Amino acid sequence: MTDTTAAGPALTRLAVSATLHCLTGCAIGEVLGMVIGTALGWSDLQTVALAVALAFVFGYALTIRPVLKSGLALSAAIPVALAADTISITVMEIVDNAIMLSIPGAMDAGLTSWLFWGSLAVALAVAFLVTVPVNRWLIVRGRGHAVVHQYHHAEHTAPAISDEHHGHAGH
């Protein structure tokens, strides 16, 4: 889908903002999981499983926090976070872990190795680039970060999120 309207750059900025938000939670969980798994000498599968689980935990936590701050109850904030972040986190985790696993020696390099940290940085950067268009696609359809965006600004206004157009320039 090609943008021919002025909303294109604003939508892209919102998608970049949403993806940076996702990357923050994923990176915290991913780095923590990789560090713990590597330090404990776990297998690649165990380490990746922990990293993915922690990426989801931190990703959702970073979304739930501002939603709770907007006044929404925890029981209502959890489904908002799940709707907002699940696809984005899933794509980011698939890409970044596939890259980590595909770089020879990266998972076994150890915490003091530039190979480990460089591979993780490259994996997260590529995952970010792949996830931006996914988030943009979701936002255009009123899904993903569009679901939670109204709660980020609840103290000022609560903008309606339409399925047709999202002219927000980001946070």
Image: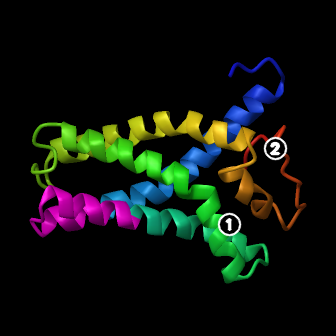
Q: Is residue 69 left or right of residue 21?
A: right
Residue in front for this viewpoint, 82 or 35: 82
State the predominant SS element of the stretch in magenta.
helix
Residue 65 appears in the figure: no
- The image quadrant that residue 165 belongs to is top right
Q: Which of the labelled discs sits on residue 80, or is there none?
A: 1
Residue depicted at 73% across the width and 35% down the height: 11
In terms of sequence position, does the residue under pointer 1 or pointer 2 come before the other?
1
Q: Secondary structure at mark 2?
A: loop
Q: Is residue 95 left or right of residue 149?
A: left
Q: Secondary structure at mark 1?
A: helix
Quick one: label 2, few (<14), some, or many (20+) residues within 10 Å?
Answer: few
Image coordinates of residue 23 in percent, x first then y, are 48, 50
Question: Residues at badges 1 and 2 in contact (C-beta under 8 Å)?
Answer: no
- The image quadrant that residue 50 belongs to is bottom left
| Residue annotated with mark 2 | 163
Query: What's the magenta region?
Result: 33-54
Image coordinates of residue 68 in percent, x first then y, are 70, 76
Position of the N terminus by quadrant: top right
Residue depicted at 12% across the width and 70% down the height: 40
**How far, Cα to Cα, is label 1 from label 2?**
16 Å
Residue depicted at 65% across the width and 36% down the height: 137
Quick one: label 1, few (<14), some, or many (20+) residues within 10 Å?
Answer: many
Q: Is residue 88 left or right of residue 148?
A: left
Instruction: Determine whether 43 is above or below 141 in the image.
Output: below
Q: How is the image coloured?
A: rainbow
Residue 30 appears in the figure: yes
Q: Amino acid at mark 2?
A: Asp
Q: Amino acid at mark 1?
A: Val
Image coordinates of residue 139 in percent, x first then y, are 70, 43
Residue depicted at 16% across the width and 56% down the height: 44
Q: Which of the labelled discs sits on residue 171, or is there none?
A: none
